Image: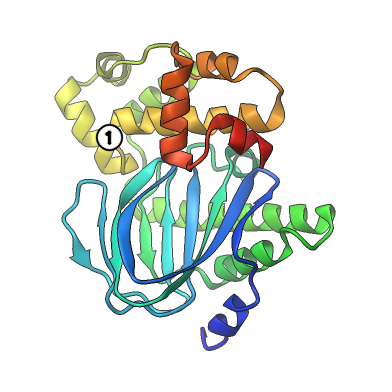
Amino acid sequence: MWTDIGRFGSRLEPGKLAWESGHSTFLSTAPGEGSFAFSGVTLGIVLRSLPSHHAAYGSDRRRHMPLSAGQGWLFPAGFDGWCRWDEPNDFLNLEVGAGYLADADLEVPTAFRPLKGDLDPLLVQLGLNLHAAARESSTLYRDSLAAAFATQLARVVTGVNEQDRRIDPRLGRALQYIHDHLAEDITLADLAAAAAMSPFHFSRCFKAQTGLAPYAFVIARRMERAKELLRATRLPVAEIAWRVGYRNPAKFATQFKRLTGATPGEWRGN
């Protein structure tokens, strides 16, 4: 199935390309290692086999996870980890903004189990085509591809969630609390109270079902909302920081750059 993926990858334009409510980044790297953090839902496609690939997700221990061309990862918003590879590495990351995902009825982009290894073939093909079209094609064609990509991604995530237990209704109340109080100081006690659970039990259940600790989930959702405001409005960065729960704009800018690799101003200008 993946015999042509290397040749397709050779036609992709290196670097980061922005498209409506998202961006894609194609990189060719030497052997290396490092940490990563994605503020938005991210699909990664490996274009060259990595038999030596090792990774650690969140606080997990480092494990050997070999990847073949065409395999990769699908991570929820706010996901972080570490990886290492001993061969030259060609890969494509596509990060999807919350706007397209909401249009595709994926309202909680952090609440699904991370995937690694085999990927949905249609999702991979749409992702490759979207990056290839990001700069040279018409806006209408590119945006149509982006919408199709987000729709298929939502279908894949929905399938993952259907395989797992449904989100506990008590946790659903906590997720709604986060949505309604994003600009406020949200504490673990607030979320546990919304779920009618003890803080200790709530923390364990929340991470088991969303893949993130409550604090990391809140930060990820704040960054997603900030990106929506940066993209869709001309509000000052300090005002956006306030609207997503940061009273200190410098702290917001530092957190934003740590997760996206760019300052809010740089991200808005891309």
Quick one: label 1, few (<14), some, or many (20+) residues within 10 Å? some
Which residue is drawn at the image coordinates 71% and 24% (left, top)? 233
The reply to whether residue 68 is visible in this rendering is yes
The percent position of residue 28, horizontal first and vertical second, equals 49, 70
Q: Is residue 169 above or below residue 13?
A: above
Which residue is drawn at the image coordinates 27% and 76% (left, top)? 52
Q: Nearer the viewer, residue 77 or 13?
A: 13
In the image, farthest residue toward the bottom: 3
The percent position of residue 131, horizontal first and vertical second, equals 65, 62
Question: How was the colour assigned to the protein in this rendering?
Answer: rainbow
The answer to whether 149 appears left or right of 223 in the picture is right
The reply to whether residue 172 is visible in this rendering is no
- Element assignment for label 1: loop
The percent position of residue 237, horizontal first and vertical second, equals 59, 20
Which residue has dot 1 on it?
A: 213
Q: Nearer the viewer, residue 2 or 85?
A: 85
Q: Nearer the viewer, residue 265 or 180?
A: 265
Q: Quadrant of residue 192?
A: top left
Which residue is drawn at the image coordinates 54% and 73% (left, top)? 121
Amino acid at pointer 1: Ala
* Image quadrant containing the C terminus: top right
Q: Is residue 238 above or below residue 225?
A: above
The answer to whether 159 appears left or right of 165 in the picture is right
Which residue is drawn at the image coordinates 54% and 43% (left, top)? 106
The percent position of residue 159, horizontal first and vertical second, equals 46, 57
Q: Is residue 42 above or below residue 87?
A: above
